[in-house]
Amino acid sequence: MIPGSIPDGWMLDGDAIVRRYVFSGFPAAWAFMSRVALLAERHDHHPDWRNSWNRVEIRLTTHDTGGVTARDLDLARAIDAIPATG
Amino acid sequence: MIPGSIPDGWMLDGDAIVRRYVFSGFPAAWAFMSRVALLAERHDHHPDWRNSWNRVEIRLTTHDTGGVTARDLDLARAIDAIPATG
Amino acid sequence: MIPGSIPDGWMLDGDAIVRRYVFSGFPAAWAFMSRVALLAERHDHHPDWRNSWNRVEIRLTTHDTGGVTARDLDLARAIDAIPATG
Amino acid sequence: MIPGSIPDGWMLDGDAIVRRYVFSGFPAAWAFMSRVALLAERHDHHPDWRNSWNRVEIRLTTHDTGGVTARDLDLARAIDAIPATG
């Protein structure tokens, strides 16, 4: 049971919500990740994520409860508010 | 004597070229700085720079020669190619 | 009037406390700055800082009040807790 | 056929070499990743990597050749030269 609707662009995958991003290259991917890292610290909630060159995949779940909670949805919305770059 | 024209947006200030940026806030400023850091490593040439919340000032000079060289102009142009983000 | 004692290594400079760091090179300086950036977001309080290759100078002041406050001392102590690297 | 010996701490896994790291928390993990990002740009060779809070896994392979090459071993050694932090 998800405590709210999953934001557009995110998919439910098991006990997590997932979104994938494609950038112009590593520098743009890394700049995006740098903003997500700041958000994670602000929210005190951190992604399970991977990067390969211009691709980033973010998985959000609340490990303590073993599922998607409002903390994941809040972080997802904050990530979605990052302006797109190359 | 500058080895080429100073790119638009940069000013000559003493023995350096300088550009100032204003972003929407610290996260956007930091994401920009993260891209500049990658460029600096690629170019093996590093800025003298400062940040205060949403503001970034970049000074480029070639310390070894005590003046602006092609290395500074190259890095300036690479920085200018970073897409603006807000 | 400073609301507490200035942590070792920091100096009072006008309306700010200041600390200077020297690292093995840019990569170590940048890794340190990356941790300070995370702390700044967590504390919602951001430094005025500059970097030149292996050198970092951090100035902390509370712009709203025009002087050093507990927010600056808290952030200074958090920065001091970052383990030294090369 | 690997063009040289795999550095200590790395394991061969399919067509890649892999190393896993555990840090004191996200900030230390992120600082490490920030240094790896700089190295990746310098080497013009980028990892497939993932992070979850205090854990980082780095996979190095040369996608163009579908296997481990000297570029992977060089980057692995450069990563190994990053001083350990918390």
Image: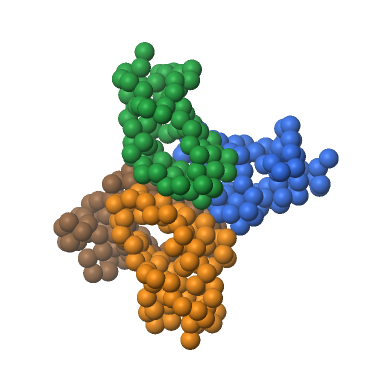
Chain colours: A orange, B green, C blue, D brown
Q: Is residue A84 above or below residue B4?
A: below
- Most extreme residue toward the right is C1
Question: Closer to the camera, C38 or C83?
Answer: C38
In the picture, residue C41 is in which quadrant? bottom right
The residue at the point 44 percent across, 51 percent down is: D34
Image position, residue C23 (x, y; %): 53, 39
Quarter placement of the N terminus of chain C: top right
Image position, residue B82 (x, y; %): 36, 42
Q: Is residue D36 left or right of residue A25?
A: right
Residue D70 visible from this viewpoint: yes
Q: Is residue C62 left or right of residue C40?
A: right
Q: Is residue D65 above or below residue A68?
A: above
Image position, residue D65 (x, y; %): 16, 58
All told, the count of numbered labels is: 0
Question: Closer to the camera, A85 or D62?
Answer: A85
Residue C27 visible from this viewpoint: no
Q: Is residue D20 left or right of residue C66?
A: left
Image position, residue C30 (x, y; %): 49, 44
The residue at the point 48 percent across, 48 percent down is: B28
